[in-house]
């Protein structure tokens, strides 16, 4: 239990110092808004109405108990109780601890000779194993589940343990097989250059899963590269071109007889701190760039330089998925592709589906909470 070594209350805030030296400045209005006693007892959702008090609210009185700060607010008949552990965990200006916040490790081919593997049954039976698999997927952007049960639904069944599947115009699941009248190059035997899926969607799918049902063809290895390692190198080597690709929004489009799904986005996305947050790279469904003519030459130079790096073998790994294996990768970071194969040499059938990032994060947190 956390202990306070000093507490002071002035006109605007409580100033708290814990025995271990941690400090917090807790404005009164913040404490009033986050009264743990004014949450719904079952949903834990806030019931307090911020409009009901002045922003300059001050405690009428307060006292420090052995494990909590007790405050009497002027417009509330009962006392409000703030556990010291709660105050330490939620102190303003500090991000709360979160098992789903995982530092990313970028990789090139030589760093990831073996894709981390997790036994599917162990993931089903052990929360720590599944949590380790999902945290590794966040760290590296790529893991393999192996020894899936010998049935066609085994991949979806494991996926449902992880999160809700995202439905797109390709369905909730999609069959990656050689089709006679394909509406996507994935459904051919042609080599498929490294790409990310569906940048034409308003929300690009987060994680992609590919469950291998059959793979007896000559060729057809799955290829992967860490797009964030590539972007990070581009940023160091050609900062102006990196900047251009993170600023210019270009159109993306998928269309067939049933759908015409379009969105404008930049190839590289940065978060508010300037860190990489997404790479969208799919030359097949990049629509006709409609940038002003004067910008096109610079755009193509930056785009081609990114493309040259993406096809550089130093970044690319290859793995021929075997029946019973399912790969999970971050579709907003890790590029995927396929070596061509001879469709007469055997069968190749992968079943794919998507689960969004926040679904995976939610599962990590519930697994961590036991
Ligand atoms: Fe794909």
Image: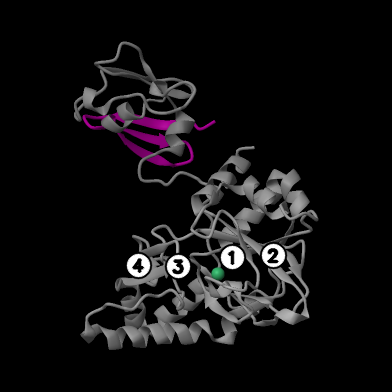
Residue 140's label in the rendered image is 1
Q: Where does the magenta region start and end?
A: 1-28
For discs 1 and 3, the disc positioned in front in the rendered view: 3
Q: Is the CB of the residue bearing disc 2 within 8 angstroms of ligand 1?
A: no
- Work out how far the residue at label 1 is from the one at label 2, CA to CA, in angstroms: 9 Å
- Residue picked out by circle 2: 116
Q: Relative to 111, does residue 325 appear above or below in the rendering?
A: above
Q: Secondary structure at mark 3?
A: loop
Please tell me which of labels 2 and 3 falls first in the chain: 2
Q: Secondary structure at mark 4?
A: strand
**Position of residue 266 measured from the top left corner of the image (x, y, whole percent):** 35, 70
Residue 256's label in the rendered image is 3
Name the foreground residue: 93 vs 143.
Answer: 143
Within the displayed image, which quadrant is ligand 1 positioned in? bottom right
How many neighbours does mark 3 have within 10 angstroms: few (below 14), some (14-19), or many (20 or more)? few
**Position of residue 74 measured from the top left corner of the image (x, y, whole percent):** 24, 16
**Residue 189 position by quadrant:** bottom right
Query: 291 left or right of 177?
Result: left
- Work out how far the residue at label 1 is from the one at label 3, CA to CA, in angstroms: 34 Å
Please tell me which of labels 4 and 2 falls first in the chain: 2
- Residue picked out by circle 4: 265
For discs 2 and 3, the disc positioned in front in the rendered view: 3
**Quadrant placement of the C terminus:** top right
Asked whether the beta carbons under mark 1 and mark 2 sit within 8 Å of each other, the answer is yes
**Position of residue 90 measured from the top left corner of the image (x, y, whole percent):** 42, 38
Please tell me which of labels 4 and 3 falls first in the chain: 3
- Work out how far the residue at label 4 is from the one at label 3, CA to CA, in angstroms: 21 Å
Name the foreground residue: 135 vs 328.
Answer: 328
């Amino acid at each position: 239990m956390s202990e306070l070594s000093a507490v002071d209350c002035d006109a605007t805030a409580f100033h708290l110092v814990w025995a271990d030296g941690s400090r917090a400045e807790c404005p009164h209005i913040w404490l009033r808004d986050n009264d743990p006693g004014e949450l719904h007892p079952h949903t834990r959702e806030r019931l307090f109405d911020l409009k009901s008090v002045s922003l300059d609210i001050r405690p009428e009185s307060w006292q420090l108990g052995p494990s909590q700060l007790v405050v009497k607010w002027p417009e509330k008949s009962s006392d409000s109780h703030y556990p010291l552990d709660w105050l330490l965990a939620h102190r303003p200006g500090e991000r709360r601890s979160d098992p789903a916040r995982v530092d990313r490790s970028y990789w090139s081919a030589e760093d990831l000779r073996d894709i981390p593997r997790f036994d599917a049954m162990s993931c089903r039976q052990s929360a720590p194993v599944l949590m380790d698999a999902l945290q590794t997927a966040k760290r590296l952007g790529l893991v393999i589940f192996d020894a899936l049960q010998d049935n066609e639904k085994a991949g979806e069944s494991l996926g449902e343990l992880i999160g809700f599947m995202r439905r797109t115009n390709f369905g909730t699941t999609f069959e990656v097989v050689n089709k006679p009248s394909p509406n996507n190059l994935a459904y051919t035997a042609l080599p498929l250059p490294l790409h990310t899926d569906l940048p034409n969607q308003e929300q690009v799918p987060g994680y992609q899963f590919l469950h291998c049902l059959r793979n007896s063809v000559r060729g057809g290895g799955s290829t992967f590269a860490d797009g964030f390692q590539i972007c990070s190198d581009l940023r160091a080597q050609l900062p102006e071109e990196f900047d251009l690709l993170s600023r210019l929004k270009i159109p993306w489009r998928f269309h067939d007889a049933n759908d015409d799904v379009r969105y404008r986005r930049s190839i590289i996305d940065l978060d508010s701190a300037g860190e990489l947050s997404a790479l969208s790279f799919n030359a097949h469904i990049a629509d006709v760039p409609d940038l002003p003519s004067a910008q096109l030459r610079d755009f193509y130079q930056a785009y081609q330089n990114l493309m040259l790096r993406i096809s550089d073998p130093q970044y690319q790994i290859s793995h021929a998925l075997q029946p019973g294996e399912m790969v999970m990768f971050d579709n907003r970071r890790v590029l995927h592709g396929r070596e061509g194969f001879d469709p007469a040499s055997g069968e190749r059938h992968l079943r794919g589906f998507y689960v969004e990032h926040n679904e995976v994060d939610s599962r990590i947190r519930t697994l961590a909470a036991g």
